[in-house]
Amino acid sequence: MLLELRVENLLLIERAELRLAGGLNVITGETGAGKTVLAHSLDLLLGGKARPGVVRPGCEEAWVEGVFSDVGGALDAPELADLRERIGAGEEIVLARRVGADGRTRAFVQGRGASAADLRELGGRLISFYGQHEHRRLTIAAAQLEILDGYCGPVQLALRQRMAAEHGRVLRLERELAGLRDRAGSRERDRDLLAFELGEIEDLEPSAAEQDLLRAERSRLRGFDVLREAVGAAAEALVSEGSEEGGAIALLAAGEGGMEAAGEIDERLASLTTRLRAVRLEAEDLGAELRDYLSDLQGDPERLEEVEQRLERYDRLERKHGGSVEAVLAYAAQSREQLALIDGGSEALERLDGELRGAIESSDEIAAALGKARAKAAPRLAEQVVTELAQLAMEDANFEVSVQPREQRGAGGDERVEFLLAPNPGVAATPLRDTASGGELSRSMLAIMGVAAAGGEETLVFDEVDAGIGGRTARAVGERLQRLAAGRQLLCITHLPQIASLAERHFLIAKSAQDELVHTTVTQLGAEQLEGELVRMLGADGDDAAARKHAQGLLRAA
């Protein structure tokens, strides 16, 4: 339901705000006052193109905003998945459109940037527009099929839902099966390659810890001579085996003995003697460890070659499978999974093929039931619509519902539906989108929806539904609009008092010249103002007693 419509700086309208309600809402006003501007504002909300010069003179931009409530599953369509993720879900949705003086536009949903396509997709689920220049939902084949199924009844609508689900399942299974069959064609080649690559990895049994140890060992083996010379020199400096002095440890021991003797003379040297002893002991430990390191140090060229070869295998696997041991191990795990899929491919093919046959069989049954109901209901719907059109000043019109097979099954079944209209006798019926004028389209829609009781819960907007009619026909159109508005929201732009008198809310558009610039205002009429507006619509002056009496009669009959 459209709760609020706000318009700023759009052609004649400087600022207008309509607070709408459920049921029948009408907009009236003098010709040229700006009723079509409101129609265009709704078109902008539905992603339509901005007309040239649509921004009010002297303004930088125009702004249109609509607040909708009870949006239900309007955002559930797959086409709106990205938008739904960006804006989330809520009980209300705000659509907005900004039009710059240069003609450029920006669209917004819930205050976030969107595309005109988003507005068309989402707005089309919230509003159905019927008019001469605006959206013509009734002319869309999918909408016509939906109307026919709605006429068939709730069982048909339930079948439609099952058909959509089964058709989606068939398409999904066909994609999966095609993928498996493509893989089966090269399965043996893929299996040999995967098995070879996995064998390489499993033969090496790589680990990051072993790779680090091998690199350290290679470094030692490559630097054997340098290590032996450096460590030997350090050990010799501490414990000399070829010198009379005996190295640094012997010198430290001699110094320690002298310090102990001196300590007996001056007790202050005791702490220094202790420290010197600690240095000598540490030097002895260090010398022993250096000698142990030298005895363990080996320079085996064969071992170096083994280490080099194993590290080369690590490098080769890393180059092939991701650049690290972790990536190699991940590739091995993935290869095992793919091998398992390939080895189980025959079973999977057989299983999917069986599921697909079952889904197709179920889809065939549902599609046949849908088609049978449509073929039976189409002539009955056409006959009743012709009867309704006769009551709406189209007594010579002929209406047909053509049900033809589709080239390919869709989510709605095997048929496509086309509404055909011949407004005048002696001409062949042609598709509604090619035949009907704005008024004829609106009245045809009234007749169809009045019979089919379809259209969902979205807001319905009618422009020019009263074109070319008056008198009793106008009253008949108004009564059908009123009946159609029961349980939903309907917005009608009209020139006829017979229709306006039936509204639950009435908005008046009026224009005036201020500062040499025309201003248009929109006012919601109260009960005391409504009678005067009906008098004006009857073409009379406010003091015309007969016209006022006529207006009062219309209101009493509403």
Image (tube, grey):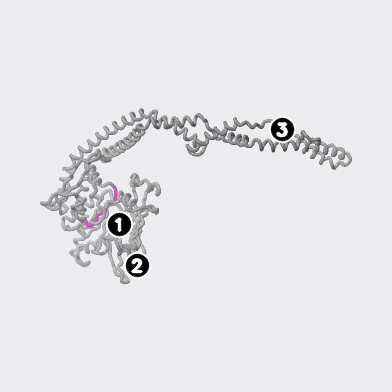
Sooner in the amino-acid sequence: mark 1 or mark 3: 1
What residue does disc 1 label? 49
Q: Residue furthest left?
A: 426
Viewer-proximal residue among 196 and 425: 196
Q: Residue furthest right?
A: 265
Q: Is residue 492 left or right of residue 221?
A: left
Sooner in the amino-acid sequence: mark 1 or mark 2: 1
Sooner in the amino-acid sequence: mark 3 or mark 2: 2
Q: Is 464 within the magenta? A: yes
Callout in the foreground (1, 3)? 3
Viewer-proximal residue among 525 and 184: 184
Q: CA distance from mark 1 to mark 3?
A: 91 Å
Q: Residue 225 falls in which quadrant of the image?
A: top right
Q: Secondary structure at mark 1?
A: loop
Q: Amino acid at mark 2?
A: Gly
- Is label 1 in contact with label 2 (beta carbons under 8 Å)? no
Viewer-proximal residue among 512 and 103: 103
Residue 164 location, x and y as percent?
29, 39
Label 2 CA crowd tier, 10 Å (few <14, some 14–19, many 20+): few
What residue does disc 3 label? 291
Image quarter hosting the C terminus: bottom left
Q: Secondary structure at mark 2?
A: loop
361 is higher (above) or lower (below) than 138? above
Task: Give the number of marks.
Answer: 3
- The magenta segment is 457-465
Q: Which mark is residue 58?
A: 2
